Image (cartoon, rainbow, N blue to C red):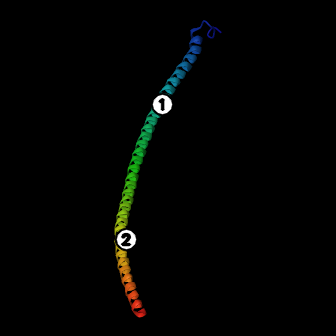
C-alpha cells in the first residue's frame, strides 16, 4: 500500500498522467475539428461565392437576352407598322386617282346627256314641224 497511497509520486503521476494524456488528446482532437470546420467553411464560402457569381452571370445574360428580344420585336413591329402605313397611303392615292377618274367619267356622261337632250329637243322640233305640216 505504500506505493499506491496518495502521497506516492508514482501513483499520482500515473493517475494524472492518464488524465493529462486524455486532455492533450481531447485538445488535439478539438484543434483538428476546428481546422476541419474552418477548412470546410472556407470551401463552402468559395462555393457560395462561385454560385453567386454564376447567378449574377445568368441574370446578366437573361437581361441581355430580353433586351435583344425586345429590340428585335420593336424592329419587327415598326417594320410592320411602316408597311401598313405605306399600304394605307397607296390605297388613299389609288382612291384619289379613282375619284378623279370617276369625276372625269361623270363629266363625260353629263356632256353626253346634254348632247342627247339637245338631240331630243331637235327631234321634238322636227317632229312638231312634221305634224304641223301634216295637219295643215
Q: Quadrant of residue 63?
A: top left
Which mark is drawn over residue 52?
Answer: none
Residue 136, above or below 17: below
Decide: few, some or many residues near mark 1? Use Cα within 10 Å; few <14, some 14-19, many ≥20: few
Which of 76/104 is in front? 104
Q: Residues within 10 Å of mark 2 (few under 14, many from 20)?
A: few
**Mark 1 or mark 2, which has the lower sequence index?**
1
Towards the viewer: 87 or 131? 131
Mark 2 — residue? 102
Image point (37%, 76%), residue name? 109
Residue placed most toward the observer, 90 or 7: 90
- Is residue 35 left or right of 98 when viewed as pictured? right
Find residue 57 and report its horizontal and vertical position in percent. 41, 42
Q: Give me the C-alpha separation between circle 1 and circle 2.
A: 89 Å
In the rendered image, which residue does mark 1 sit on? 41
Nearer to us: label 1 or label 2: 2
Q: Quadrant of the C terminus?
A: bottom left
- Residue that extends furthest to the top in the rendered view of this protein: 7
Q: Helix or strand or loop: what does disc 2 sit on?
A: helix
Q: Is residue 127 above or below residue 85?
A: below
Q: Position of residue 126 (x, y in %)?
A: 37, 87
Q: Quadrant of residue 1?
A: top right
Residue 33 in percent (x, y) is at: 51, 27
Measured as percent of width and height from the top left, residue 107 is found at 35, 72
Amino acid at each position: 500500500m505504500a506505493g499506491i497511497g496518495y502521497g506516492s509520486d508514482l501513483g499520482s503521476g500515473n493517475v494524472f498522467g492518464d488524465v493529462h494524456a486524455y486532455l492533450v488528446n481531447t485538445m488535439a482532437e478539438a484543434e483538428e475539428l476546428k481546422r476541419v470546420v474552418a477548412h470546410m467553411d472556407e470551401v463552402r464560402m468559395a462555393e457560395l461565392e462561385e454560385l453567386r457569381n454564376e447567378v449574377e452571370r445568368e441574370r446578366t445574360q437573361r437581361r441581355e437576352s430580353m433586351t435583344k428580344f425586345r429590340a428585335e420585336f420593336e424592329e419587327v413591329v415598326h417594320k410592320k407598322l411602316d408597311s401598313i402605313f405605306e399600304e394605307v397611303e397607296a390605297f388613299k392615292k389609288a382612291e384619289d386617282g379613282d375619284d378623279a377618274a370617276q369625276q372625269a367619267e361623270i363629266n363625260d356622261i353629263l356632256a353626253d346627256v346634254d348632247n342627247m337632250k339637245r338631240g331630243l329637243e331637235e327631234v321634238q322640233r322636227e317632229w312638231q314641224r312634221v305634224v304641223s305640216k301634216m295637219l295643215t
